[in-house]
Structures are given as C-alpha cells and as structure tokens.
C-alpha cells in the first residue's frame, strides 16, 4: 500500500494496521511532494507486466506528475505509444532505435516505415533514444551511424526533440551531429560521461538528463563534479529514472553525508519500499532530485521546478 493511502481497520490484520499508522505518523514530519517529471522510464519492460497500474499510481503519489516512456525499437516504440493512450496526460511516448538495435533496421529495412508512422503520432513527443554506443558490440559502428543519421533526418522533418544515447563514442557522434543544420532541441539522456565531455554538449546548447547513476559515480571528473562546480546550469538539466535500471543506491559508501541527509524521509519511504536493484521505479525520482539539489547546493524545490519547466517546454507536455 502506498504511504499516502488511508488504512482500513481490519481485525485480522492488526500488525499491518499498526505499520500503516506508524507510517502515517512519520509522514507528518516530511515535506510535501516535489512536483517532478520523469523524462525516461522503460515501462514497456516485462518487469512491469503484472502491476503497471500500481507502478504508475505510486509514481503519481510520490509527485511524479508525468512520465516519458522510451521506445528503443520498433516494437517497444509501438508499445510506448499504446501506453500513452491508456494513460493520457500522464504517460507520453518516444520513438527510436537504440544503437544496440540498429542492425534490426539494416536487416529489415521495411520496419523503418513503421517507426516513422509511430513517431508522427501526437502522443509521441520525441525521436530516440538514438545515437552511438561503442561499449558493447550488439550492432556494428557503421550500422549504428547509418540508423542514427536516419533518425536525425526524421527528428528534423517532424520538428521533435532528439534523445541521444552515447557511450564511449562522443567524437564520432558530434561529427555526425555537426553535419546537420536546423537540429531540434537535443537531449543527452542518462549522461554518464566526464565534465569535459559534458562541456562539449553544453557548448552546443544541448540538454543533459541525469539518473541515479550519480550514486555510482566515484570519479573526480564525472557527473558529481558537473553539479558541484556549477558546470551544468539548471536551464539545461532534466531528470529521469531509467527505470527499471539505474537504482539510486542512497546507502552507497561513497555518497557524501550531506547528500544522504538531503534526502527526505518521504522520498526514502518510496525508494526503499518499492524500488530494488533488480527493479527501479519512477517513484524514486524525488530522491534523485533531492540528491542533485544537495550536490548543487540548491533547494530540491528549485531543481524540481527547473527540470519540470524544461521538460514541459521541450516536449510540449500538456
């Protein structure tokens, strides 16, 4: 049961009732919900097949007002669009071919037209995630480049924002992007690179989306530095859970104490009760926002408001 739900008195479930009352009492000392927007959740993943309604409701209860469900293949793009019609004004979809899946379009070129059709739907608010990923060899680099370029043309033609996925391929990715004029807004999603790499994106006025990866980042030159030294301004920042992946481990030993204490009890209740390393959920987003705020030495409300405004503006969410 979600933290905000009222409990019913059931004589045969006294221990459960007692737990619920304890939780309700603890909530009196928590902040009101942050209003946040998750610009990247993989709710087409089979891990949500049995309880998606509950997952979406928990997200809403936690303060996640809108969710963008990513399409990373023709099949998942079609499913993401279906979800956006089941949950109107809550879920919005994207349509893309992830670099790992590029070879599927090369091998079956006719499926590209299915993706084009999906991307034209009103509920589909962005093209991607697409880009280059050289960390794994699911698709050859040449195939990745070919399909990435096709999606760039599509985003420009539809005038829809472009979601970029990049791993160990920045030089090649920027070389391709720099050949295109009149690019729509570009969002580098799930950024895991260095501060130096981030600057190259920010110089081009791209947006950067962060996940719970900042719990894992232990480098002196990575995501945490971006936030601590002010390299990443609020007007270029978005937030996402990448659920069911990127669980934000708030108990990580390398996470600074001031960041841990910046997470409210309310956010921790949702995170620890409903999210695991095996299955993260969108309801973890407020905890991520609070960690980002602590690293940036800003209030969670500032970060929540700025990232929500950026998402509403970029993707035209109603």
Image (cartoon, rainbow, N blue to C red):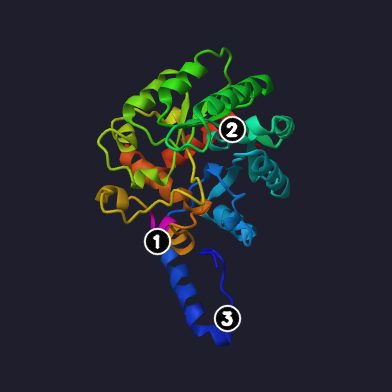
Label 1 and label 2: CA atoms lie apart by 41 Å
The residue sitting at the bottom extreme is: 12
Circle 1 sits on which residue? Answer: 29
Viewer-nearest residue: 310 or 176: 176
Q: Kindly identify the residue that appears in the image at 53 percent across and 63 percent down.
A: 4
Residue 166 higher or lower than 300, as above or below = above
The answer to whether residue 316 shows anywhere in this view is no
| Secondary structure mostly seen in the magenta stretch | helix
The answer to whether residue 187 shows anywhere in this view is yes
Circle 3 sits on which residue? Answer: 9
Segment colored magenta: 264-268
Instruction: Return the x and y of residue 87 as percentages of the image width and height.
Output: 69, 49
Instruction: Return the x and y of residue 123 as percentages of the image width and height.
Output: 70, 37
Task: Mark 3 vs mark 2: give the one in front.
Answer: 2
> Looking at the figure, which quarter contains the C terminus?
top right
Quarter location, residue 152: top right
Instruction: Return the x and y of residue 20 as percentages of the image width and height.
Output: 49, 73
First in sequence: mark 3 vs mark 1: 3
Q: Element under label 1? A: loop
Label 3 and label 1: CA atoms lie apart by 24 Å
Q: Element under label 2? A: strand
Q: Is residue 62 magenta?
A: no
Residue 200 higher or lower than 218, as above or below = above
Instruction: Return the x and y of residue 108 as percentages of the image width and height.
Output: 69, 33
Label 3 and label 2: CA atoms lie apart by 48 Å
Q: Kindly identify the residue that appears in the image at 59 percent across and 32 percent down.
A: 128
Task: Mark 3 vs mark 1: give the one in front.
Answer: 3
First in sequence: mark 1 vs mark 2: 1
Circle 2 sits on which residue? Answer: 128
Going by the image, does 316 lie left or right of 279? right
């Amino acid at each position: 049961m979600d933290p905000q739900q009222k409990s019913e008195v059931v004589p045969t479930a006294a221990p459960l009732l007692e737990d619920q009352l304890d939780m309700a009492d603890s909530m009196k000392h928590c902040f009101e919900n942050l209003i946040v927007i998750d610009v990247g959740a993989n709710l087409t993943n089979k891990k949500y097949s049995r309880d998606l309604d509950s997952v979406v409701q928990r997200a809403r209860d936690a303060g996640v007002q809108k969710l963008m469900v990513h399409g990373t293949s023709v099949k998942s793009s079609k499913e993401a669009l279906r979800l956006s019609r089941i949950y109107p004004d809550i879920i919005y979809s994207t349509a893309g071919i992830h670099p790992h899946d590029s070879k599927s379009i090369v091998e079956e070129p006719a499926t590209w037209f299915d993706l084009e059709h999906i991307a034209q739907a009103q509920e589909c608010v962005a093209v991607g995630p697409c880009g280059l990923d050289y960390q794994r060899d699911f698709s050859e680099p040449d195939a990745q480049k070919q399909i990435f370029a096709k999606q760039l043309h599509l985003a420009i033609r539809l005038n829809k924002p472009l979601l970029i996925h990049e791993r160990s391929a920045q030089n090649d990715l920027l070389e391709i992007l720099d050949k295109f004029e009149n690019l729509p807004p570009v969002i580098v999603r799930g950024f895991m690179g260095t501060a130096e790499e981030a600057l190259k994106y920010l110089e081009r006025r791209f947006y950067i989306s962060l996940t719970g990866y900042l719990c894992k980042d232990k480098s002196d030159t990575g995501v945490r530095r971006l936030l601590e030294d002010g390299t990443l301004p609020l007007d270029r920042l978005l937030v996402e859970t990448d659920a069911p992946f990127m669980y934000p481990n708030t108990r990580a030993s390398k996470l600074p104490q001031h960041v841990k204490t910046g997470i409210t009890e309310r956010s921790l209740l949702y995170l620890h009760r409903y999210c695991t390393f095996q299955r993260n959920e969108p309801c973890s987003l407020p905890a991520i926002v609070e960690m980002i705020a602590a690293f940036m030495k800003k209030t969670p409300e500032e970060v929540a408001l700025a990232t929500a405004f950026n998402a509403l503006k970029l993707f035209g969410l109603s």
